[in-house]
Image (tube, rainbow, N blue to C red):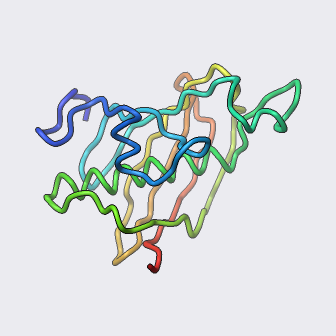
Amino acid sequence: MTSTETDSSCTLPIGVNEIRALLPHRYPFLLVDRVVAFEPGASIHAYKNVTANEEFFQGHFPGQPVMPGVLVIEALAQAGGVLYQLTNRKQGNGVIEDKLFYLVKVDNARFSRMIVPGDRVDLHVTLKRRIRNMALYEGVASVDGKEAARAEILCAEGQN
């Protein structure tokens, strides 16, 4: 969906303050900066702006900073979490505030390009299947229209 408004409860773009209301993650582990497109129950397009000030660049790697692949996968999983929460809101179920969802499985992860300071990582996540308290996503991270990483990600609701 490319329009700037999906309905009265989800006006696009969605900025970091609204994302904080949808996800439990906080600095330095909130890896989604903005949502620019959303189709309820189907897909989301979000992005992460990568800056030289990211804490992980202190050790990965000094003098040649590269965003760790596991954090790229985590960013895709977080975009999936935003998709899940926005879909619940659209369906009238509200935001699930008292539940935590965990990354439980990653399949077919591939990394084809390094992500470095100054890059904007586009996060395209599609819901493949939702089964009970689990959701299976397919995610692609790209920079300047070129694929940098992809993976299938399974997330599950945690036990309280």
- Residue furthest right in the image: 63
Left or right, 115 with reference to 44: right
- Position of residue 74 relative to residue 3, above or below, is below
- 57 vs 118, nearest the viewer: 57
Q: Residue at x 59, y 46 (%)?
A: 29
- Residue 109 image point, x, y percent: 64, 54
Left or right, 141 with reference to 158: right
- Position of residue 106 relative to residue 60, above or below, is below
Q: Residue at x 18, y 31 (%)?
A: 5
- Residue 8 image point, x, y percent: 11, 38
> How many labels sit on residues?
0
- 96 vs 131, nearest the viewer: 96
Q: Residue at x 16, y 42 (%)?
A: 9
- Residue 114 image point, x, y percent: 72, 32
Left or right, 19 with reference to 73: left
- Residue 82 image point, x, y percent: 37, 49
Q: Residue at x 55, y 39 (%)?
A: 141
Q: Quadrant of the N terminus?
A: top left
